[in-house]
Image (cartoon, rainbow, N blue to C red):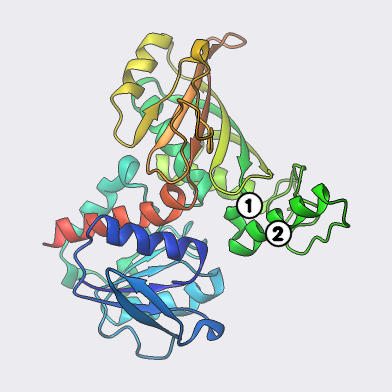
């Protein structure tokens, strides 16, 4: 395919290029787009240097597939233009996620929706029907873990608390954590620019803007997107999103009440055989999911890897059919870049 990447110099864009190369995605040509300040910058890909461009009218007419890893405003303006030029669009912004006519895809969970759309024939699709949305990074790992419970025992209620790394707010946010940490250790004054408070040695119970009901925009994304992806519009779900002082990988504490009674052994068996998920659940040996367990640890960390890691699996005895677990995933990979590329791979396979 003739591939374009919008937002190529950002944290997710850089991961996307790394994964495209590592997975040998079938690329005939590659164009990279970024903001004005990155115009002319060269990025290495597969042994060659590719010059970054800025978006201009008509720039997508030689693209078959366009990945968007930019702001909502950029996607709202340019994604429809890419689709109108004949390209498939995989968009990681929030611009189209809740639109009823645009699929919100996590391949392991609801990839069949995309396959059905492709079966209609590319020529039969309108430009808007060639836009595919990718979910919020916290939503991706959550629905991967929830889908098998839905399929086997039904979902009655979900409560999730997130522990989200600074990379979820971009490269500059990661730098702010690093600079603030150094300032604290050196006894210097802390300056906060991207976060409302110091992120070093702190947890901030706010991601996004507050809404009238007291939830944040991030929490609403998790709840609304999960309902759409799982196909349960009335799912009772509650989310609390917290920014924590880590660089990469989001953790989530999840409590689920199922519709049917289950055994913990049956749940464990399902998770042991699930594509895209790794069960790390040996608490007696201190084995459970983490982002960076350390070089001398025997635990495989989630950061830099593709799977969703699940552990601390246990019954919630306060209800008849309750379950608790802890999940960790690399938010820049499975939470964004890898999920988008997996959608792209589905398109390649289905279209031929």
Residue at (46%, 38%) from the top-left corner?
Answer: 302
| Rendering coords of residue 6 (x, y %) | 42, 74
Across and down, in percent, residue 140 comes to: 45, 44
Q: Nearer the viewer, residue 326 or 9?
A: 9
Question: Which percent across, then down, holds residue 277?
Answer: 36, 33
Quadrant housing the N terminus: bottom left
The vertical placement of 101 against 264, above or below, is: below
Q: Secondary structure at mark 2?
A: helix
Furthest-left residue in this view: 352
Say which residue appears at 64% left-offset and 64% top-offset: 172
Image side of residue 174 versus residue 274, left or right: right
Q: Is residue 207 above or below residue 12?
A: above
Distance between mark 1 and mark 2 Cα atoms:
9 Å
In the rendered image, the quadrant that contains the C terminus is: bottom left
| Residue at 29% in and 34% down | 275
Considering the numbered disc 1 on the image, is that residue within a helix, a strand or a loop? helix
Q: Earlier in the sequence, mark 1 or mark 2?
A: 1
Estimate how packed mark 2 is, as few (under 14), some (14 to 19) or many (20 or more) residues with alpha carbons within 10 Å: many
Residue with the mark numbered 1: 166
Query: Which residue is identified by label 2?
Result: 176
| Residue 24 image point, x, y percent | 22, 59
Check if mark 1's residue and mark 2's residue have beta carbons within 8 Å: yes
Seen from the viewer's position, the closer of residues 294 and 82 is: 294
Q: Left or right: where does residue 174 sit relative to residue 123?
A: right
- Residue located at (49% from left, 13% from top): 285
């Amino acid at each position: 395919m003739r591939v374009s990447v919008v937002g190529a110099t950002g944290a997710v864009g850089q991961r996307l290029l790394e994964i495209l190369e590592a997975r040998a995605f079938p690329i005939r040509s590659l164009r990279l787009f970024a903001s004005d300040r990155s115009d002319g910058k060269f990025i290495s890909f597969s042994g060659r240097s590719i010059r970054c461009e800025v978006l201009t009218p008509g720039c997508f007419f030689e693209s078959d597939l366009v990945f968007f890893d930019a702001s909502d405003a950029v996607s709202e303006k340019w994604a429809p233009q890419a689709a109108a030029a004949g390209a498939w669009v995989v968009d990681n912004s929030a611009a189209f996620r809740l639109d009823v006519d645009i699929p919100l895809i996590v391949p392991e969970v609801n990839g069949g929706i995309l396959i059905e759309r492709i079966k209609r024939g590319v020529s039969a699709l309108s430009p808007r029907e060639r836009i595919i949305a990718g979910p919020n990074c916290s939503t991706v790992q959550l629905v991967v873990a929830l889908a098998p419970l839905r399929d086997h025992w039904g979902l009655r209620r979900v409560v999730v608390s997130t522990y989200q790394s600074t990379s979820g707010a971009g490269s500059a946010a990661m730098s702010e954590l690093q600079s603030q940490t150094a300032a604290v250790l050196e006894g210097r004054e802390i300056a906060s620019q991207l976060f409302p408070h110091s992120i070093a040695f702190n947890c901030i119970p706010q991601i996004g803007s507050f809404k009238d009901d007291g939830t944040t925009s991030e929490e609403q994304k998790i709840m609304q997107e999960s309902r759409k992806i799982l196909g349960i519009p009335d799912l009772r779900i509650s989310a609390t999103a917290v920014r924590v002082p880590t660089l990469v990988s989001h953790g989530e504490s999840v409590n689920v009440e199922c519709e049917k009674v289950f055994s913990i052994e049956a749940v464990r068996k399902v998770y042991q055989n699930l594509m895209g998920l790794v069960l790390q659940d040996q608490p007696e040996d201190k084995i459970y999911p983490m982002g960076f367990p350390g070089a001398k640890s025997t635990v495989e960390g989630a950061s830099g890897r593709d799977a969703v890691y699940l552990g601390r699996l246990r019954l919630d005895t306060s209800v008849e059919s309750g379950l608790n677990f802890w999940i960790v995933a690399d938010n820049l990979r499975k939470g964004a870049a890898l999920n988008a590329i997996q959608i792209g791979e589905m398109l390649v396979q289905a279209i031929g």
